Image: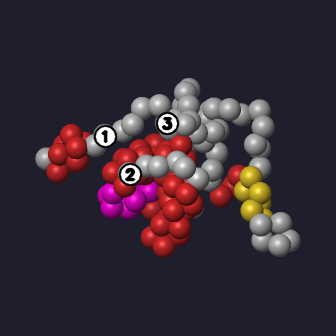
Amino acid sequence: AKVRRWLDNLALERGKPSSGDGQLGPANWIADQSAKLWKLNTTGSKLSHFIPYRLPFVWDVAQAIVEWDLSALDEDALCKKVRAGNLPFGQSELQFFALAVAAFELGKAVMFGGERSKYAQRLLQTASSV
């Protein structure tokens, strides 16, 4: 009943900018000698291999939070930077996409035999905390 009320009150805006390739996990980044992060594979992949359409940018924000297992402090800092770039989104919208990312990633873990991995267990915890 609680989830139903939450979904009934959720308003996702249409027409927001779309995400990129959906490849924001830690394995897609490298740090240089000065500890600056650089994104790998930034060309030739406009869409995720798993989702055949472009997602709202809030998916990318949620994906970074979930896949990088950001602390509340780091999550807040990321959200402030995104919003400062004139990309507004609400907390309910972010929670919805964090739950969706966690469920999606958990589904992939199960499909590929990793349901008992630490990553899958953390995804279950993330999904239950949203």
- Where does the image place residue 111, in percent across and percent down from the top left? 50, 40
At numbered mark 2, what does the secondary structure look like: helix, strand or loop? loop
Which residue was labeled with disc 1? 11
Q: How far apart are marks 2 and 3 (CA)?
A: 12 Å
Q: How far apart are marks 2 and 1 (CA)?
A: 9 Å
- Which image quadrant for residue 122? bottom left
Q: Which residue is drawn at 74% across and 62% down?
A: 37
Q: Give amino acid for label 2.
A: Gly
Say whether residue 63 is left or right of residue 123: right
Graded by Cα atoms within 10 Å as few (under 14), some (14 to 19) or many (20 or more), the crowding at tag 3 reads some
Say whether residue 16 is left or right of residue 128: right
Q: Give amino acid for label 1.
A: Ala
- Where does the image place residue 73, in percent across and percent down from the top left? 48, 73
Q: Which of 91 and 5 is in front in this view?
A: 91
Q: Which of marks 1 and 3 is nearer the N terminus?
A: 1
Q: Give amino acid for label 3.
A: Lys
Which residue was labeled with disc 2? 90
Above or below, 101 against 53 in this view is below
Which residue was labeled with disc 3? 16
Q: Nearer the viewer, residue 71 or 11?
A: 11
Q: Give the range drawn in magenta.
A: 123-130
Q: Which of marks 2 and 3 is nearer the N terminus?
A: 3
Say whether residue 119 is left or right of residue 41: left
Are the residues at dot 2 and dot 1 in contact (C-beta closer than 8 Å)? yes
**What is the tally of numbered marks visible in this picture?**
3
At numbered mark 3, what does the secondary structure look like: helix, strand or loop? loop
